[in-house]
Image (cartoon, rainbow, N blue to C red):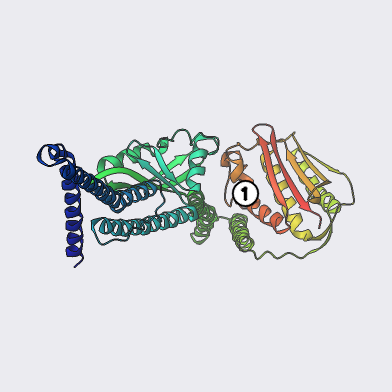
């Protein structure tokens, strides 16, 4: 119905415009012939009539020209302005043209298109914000590369990872001005993914860390347009796995030795290889000593396991640290003379009181540290003990230092000496008194149970120094 109504309206407009044009034609082209065919009086009236006809035709065509301008040109201008506004990002722009002709249909279609576009853009923005939130909340590093190997998208952990690999801060890296390329450790994996078009994974070693990398290609239709990589720092997992493997190997080694000796000597007794009571007693004594050694190992393992599980039996009371240090010094003085070592003790700021500490546990700490110092220090050298007080913004603390002039510990081994069964160099430990490798691990757990810290410094050939800091609370 609207189609026929629009068609009839256009026909009326066309007819009226044609009538106006005909009238103007008659007035302009027939007027010169009037003088020659009519009388003077009639000629004047006819001229006036044709003049009026021309004026009416002109007014009709002008009116309908303005009408057409209003009906066509102005709506088209509105459509052009609305399209330009949408081009600039104003997706809420609409056209207020109400008519039943093609212009009205175009305006309605344009408004529907703008509404659909606005809805689509909102959905895309919501998806983008959702993806951005997911990326920001991930603890793993995510890096997205284009075909040229440039980083085009990353999350905060990814930014920190790339910047740390390059030894700079992300803010100071100039990333706003130029893009980063594929980090060197990831280049082989990136090339493999781009060539094969399949997912790939690997573990890469960067500086002192280990990273597990999973990389997958990004497709547009059937063309690879880049790759996305997910990086996870597995340094701690690798370290724990190594510690676990070392623990199993060390426990097996430490238990195998006394078991082998006990088995060998017991078989000798059973075979009657002992020719005299003295030899029999000697074999029995070796078996007894090895059983005690294995018992100490099992006890240390049980104690360490309980400590690391948080079940440390601490009998807290007031401890006078200066008296404890002097007592331990007297206990090791005889042993130092036997070995030809000079054991010196110095206490400053006495009395040194800890209001809530376990005296027996602290004595175990000092005993283990001095045992290590004696085993690693050759005769003629010195071992120093010092206890004193210090204070900082966090409060007062008691400091205990044990320093030797032994063979020292390599710098690469220092971070691991407090691990269970870790021995920096078994060749430097005297065979007759080799330890179990659990002493320093037990020391660390006891000190931490007292809310303190223990650190170690060492220089090869010059000795080692252990510093215990116990807060006074």
Q: Is residue 182 left or right of residue 195?
A: right
On the rendered structure, is 102 left or right of 135? left
**Image quadrant where residue 4 sits:** bottom left
Residue at left offset 62%, top offset 55%: 278
> Residue farthest to the bottom?
1
- SS at badge 1: loop
Q: Judge by depth and name the residue closer to the eye, 203 or 167.
A: 167
Q: Of residues 143 and 46, which is closer to you in this image?
A: 46
Q: Position of residue 87 (x, y in %)?
A: 37, 46
Left or right of residue 215: residue 300: right
Q: Position of residue 397 (x, y in %)?
A: 80, 50
Which quarter of the rendering shows the C terminus? Answer: bottom right
- The residue at the point 52 percent across, 57 percent down is 259
Q: Residue furthest top?
A: 461
Residue 292 visible? The answer is no
Residue matched to label 1? 418
Residue 431 at x, y = what percent? Answer: 60, 44
The quarter of the picture where residue 295 lies is bottom right
Q: Nearer the viewer, residue 208 or 461?
A: 208
Which residue does the image show at 60% across and 43% down from the upper left?
A: 415
Q: Position of residue 60 (x, y in %)?
A: 25, 50
Nearer to us in this view, 322 or 120: 120
Q: Is residue 308 visible?
A: yes
For the N terminus, the image quarter is bottom left
């Amino acid at each position: 119905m609207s189609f026929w109504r629009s068609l009839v309206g256009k026909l009326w407009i066309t007819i009226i415009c044609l009538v106006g044009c005909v009238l103007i034609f008659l007035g302009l082209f027939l007027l010169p012939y009037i003088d020659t065919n009519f009388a003077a009086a009639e000629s004047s009236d006819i001229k006036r009539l044709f003049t009026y006809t021309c004026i009416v035709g002109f007014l009709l065509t002008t009116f309908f020209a303005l009408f057409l301008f209003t009906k066509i040109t102005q709506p088209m201008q509105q459509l052009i302005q609305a399209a330009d506004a949408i081009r600039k990002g104003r997706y809420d722009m609409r056209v207020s043209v109400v008519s039943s002709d093609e212009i009205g249909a175009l305006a309605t279609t344009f408004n529907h298109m703008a509404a659909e576009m606005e809805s689509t853009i909102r959905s895309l923005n919501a998806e983008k914000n959702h993806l951005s939130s997911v990326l920001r909340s991930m603890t793993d590093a995510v890096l997205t590369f284009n075909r040229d190997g440039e980083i085009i998208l990353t999350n905060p952990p990814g930014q920190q990872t790339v910047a740390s690999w390059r030894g700079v801060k992300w803010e100071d890296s100039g990333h706003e001005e130029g893009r980063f390329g594929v980090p060197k450790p990831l280049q082989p994996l990136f090339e493999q993914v781009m060539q094969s078009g399949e997912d790939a994974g690997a573990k890469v070693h960067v500086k002192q860390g280990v990273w597990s990398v999973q990389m997958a290609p990004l497709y547009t239709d059937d063309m690879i347009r880049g790759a996305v990589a997910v990086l996870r720092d597995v340094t701690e997992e690798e370290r724990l796995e190594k510690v676990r493997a070392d623990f199993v190997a060390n426990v097996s080694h430490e238990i195998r030795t006394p078991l082998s000796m006990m088995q060998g000597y017991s078989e000798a007794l059973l075979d009657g290889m002992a020719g005299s009571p003295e030899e029999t007693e000697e074999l029995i004594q070796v078996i007894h000593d090895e059983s005690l050694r294995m018992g100490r190992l099992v006890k240390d393992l049980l104690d360490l396991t309980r400590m690391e599980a948080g079940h440390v039996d601490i009998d807290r009371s007031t401890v006078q640290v200066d008296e404890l240090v002097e007592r331990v010094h007297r206990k090791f003085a005889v042993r130092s003379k036997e070995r030809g070592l000079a054991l010196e003790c110095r206490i400053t700021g006495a009395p040194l009181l800890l209001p809530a500490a376990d005296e027996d546990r602290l004595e175990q700490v000092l005993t283990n540290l001095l045992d290590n110092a004696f085993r690693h220090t050759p005769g003629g050298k010195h071992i120093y003990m010092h206890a004193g007080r210090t204070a900082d913004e966090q409060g007062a603390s008691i400091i205990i230092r044990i320093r030797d002039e032994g063979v020292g510990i390599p710098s690469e081994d220092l971070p691991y000496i407090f691990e269970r069964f870790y021995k920096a160099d078994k060749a430097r430990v005297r065979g007759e008194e080799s330890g179990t490798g659990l002493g320093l691990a037990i020391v660390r757990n006891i000190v931490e149970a007292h809310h303190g810290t223990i650190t170690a410094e060492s220089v090869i050939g010059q000795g080692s120094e252990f510093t215990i800091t116990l807060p006074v609370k």
